[in-house]
Image (cartoon, rainbow, N blue to C red):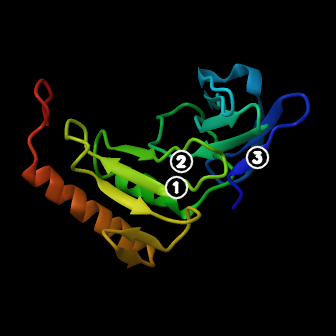
Amino acid sequence: MEWTRTIAADGTWLCEHIDSQGNPAPASVLNIAALENVYHSPSNSRGELVCPGCGTLWRGWPKQRQVKFYIESPLGNVSPYQRAHRTDIDTLIAQVWKRFAGLQVTQYQYVWPADDDGIWWFRLPGITRQKDVQLETADGMLPFYVDQRKLTTMEEAVGRVCNLLKKIQATSQPHAGQSG
């Protein structure tokens, strides 16, 4: 799967969607001029944009004319649409998210668009970052690696991540001011 896209000459790219049945749905035309949280540097300016059609987080590098989508926690009912390019990590996140209220999933975001981004963290609300579950995958597809274990089926991966989160939940105290 190609996560990096080239920005068209007019500064746009498409975020393609599917509906809840998996059928093609209208795409959103996104524009590099709409990037937010822009970090400026002489060689590597970059920013972010959330697709209004499906809630996908995109990061963009205007000088390199590239954008990349990131797969993170579900953003709620932003739209009846989902990003069209679904991967195994999307399925895993959705299944684990259903079992842990408030679960936060973040994908490692590198500085350059060509860098590898195949690392995700699963974190329970109110628990320190040092106590999260890290998952690695080269392309968002099985196999996944968790705690140096190669997980080759979705059932195995969901079970491993959920078991580790349950252990963290059982042995952790929430941050001051948070309940859990």
Where, by quadrant of the figure, is residue 138 drawn?
Answer: bottom right
Q: Amino acid at mark 1?
A: Asp
Measure the C-alpha gap from mark 2 to mark 1. 7 Å
- Are circles 2 and 1 on residues that touch, CB within 8 Å? yes
Residue located at (44% from left, 43% from top): 73
**Closer to viewer: mark 3 or mark 2:** 3
Please report the residue visible at 63 percent of the width from the left and 36 percent of the height from the top.
Answer: 59
Residue type for callout 2: Ile
Crowding near the residue tagged with mark 1, few <14, some 14–19, many ≥20 C-alpha atoms within 10 Å:
some
Pointer 3 with pointer 1, Cβ within 8 A: no
Q: Which residue is mark 2?
A: 71
Q: Residue at 34% across / 73% down in the picture?
A: 148
Where the N terminus falls, by quadrant? bottom right
For marks 2 and 1, the one nearer the N-term is: 2
Image x and y of residue 152, in percent: 45, 79
Quadrant of the drawing holding the C terminus: top left
Say whether residue 18 is left or right of residue 159. Answer: right
Residue 142: x %, y % from top left: 51, 72
Tell me if residue 171 comes above or below residue 51 in the rendering: below
Q: CA distance from mark 3 to mark 2?
A: 15 Å
Question: 80 and 154: which one is in front?
Answer: 154
Q: Between 60 and 74, which is closer to the camera in this rendering?
A: 60
Q: Secondary structure beneath disc 2?
A: loop
Q: Residue at x 32, y 43 (%)?
A: 103
Relative to the observer, which residue lies in front, 16 or 44? 44
Query: Mark 3 belongs to which amino acid?
Result: Arg
Q: Position of residue 177 (x, y in %)?
A: 12, 23
Which numbered disc covers residue 51?
Answer: none
In the picture of the structure, the residue carrying the numbered disc 3 is 5
Label whose residue precedes the other's in the sequence (3 or 2): 3
Q: Which residue does the numbered mark 1 point to in the structure image?
A: 90
In the structure shown, which secondary structural element does the residue marked by tag 1 occupy? Answer: helix
